[in-house]
Amino acid sequence: MNLIEALQSVPDYRHARGKRHPLWILLVFIVMGNLAGYQGNRPLEGFARRYGSEVARLLDIELTAIPSFSTFRRAHIGLDFNALSRAFGAWMQQHIPVDEELYAIDGKRMRQPITTAEGQTRFVGLVSVFAQTQGITVDLAAMTTTENSELKVVQYLLEKLQLSGVVFTLDALHAQKNSVAHTRDRQ
């Protein structure tokens, strides 16, 4: 599976009316733009304007129009971050072998909250598991203030990865009685 196939597996939640771009094309621009330092909807529009035709040529895709700021905004509002992180993680794990003994786990919130059309604010963040010697992110999962916490996401990632005989570094948030007991039960 290549990265485009992985991004195509993310479900498109949008209605067909008025939809110009398949979701996976927007995700390609979002991933590539973020990797190039274009973070936020307006900068992503600038990235698409500047490099859109070159991206389309390199990926051999038909790009009838450049995605706008509002297109990226709407894509971010309804995006299933868990589906995106699962798809990206599945692609990454098949291409990057990890043989580590030391991992760092940390969560970071996005700088800018996502506001829905109804005016509700949703803060989104990511918790990542980082292989320190190789310098790569092994896995990640989304967290939101309304659906889950960093503690629960870390527990989910530990269960998912099933790593044993390794050392994890975590911040003080995870030095709680229940977190330590959960980790000890797994060993």
Image (cartoon, rainbow, N blue to C red):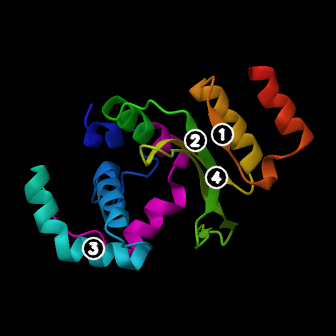
Q: Which kind of residue does numbered mark 1 sit on?
A: Phe
Residue shown at the point (57%, 39%) measured from the top left: 102
* Marks 1 and 4, how far apart at CA: 10 Å
Q: Which residue is mark 1?
A: 168
Label 2 – label 3 distance at C-alpha: 33 Å
The numbered mark at residue 106 is: 4
Residue situated furthest right in the rendering: 177
Q: Is any part of residue 61 visible from this angle?
A: no
N-term mark: 2 or 3: 3
In percent of width and height, residue 152 lies at 75, 41
Which residue is tagged 3?
Answer: 47
Q: Disc 2 vs disc 4: which is toward the camera? A: 2
Where disc 4 sits, the SS reads strand
Label 2 environment density (alpha carbons within 10 Å; few <14, some 14–19, many ≥20): many
Judge from the rendering whether residue 180 lies leftward or rightward of residue 22; answer left or right.
Answer: right
**Over which residues does the magenta segment extend?**
64-86
Q: Amino acid at mark 2?
A: Tyr
Separation (CA) of disc 3 from disc 1: 37 Å
First in sequence: mark 3 vs mark 4: 3
Magenta stretch holds residue 176: no
Q: Secondary structure at mark 2?
A: strand
Instruction: Give me the disc on residue 177.
Output: none
Find residue 57 and report its image quarter: bottom left
Q: Secondary structure at mark 1?
A: strand
Residue 169 at what x, y percent from top left? 67, 46
Of helix, strand and loop, which one carries label 3? helix
Residue with the mark numbered 2: 103
Q: Residue at x 86, y 30 (%)?
A: 181
Residue type indicated by callout 4: Asp
Q: Position of residue 164 (x, y in %)?
A: 63, 23
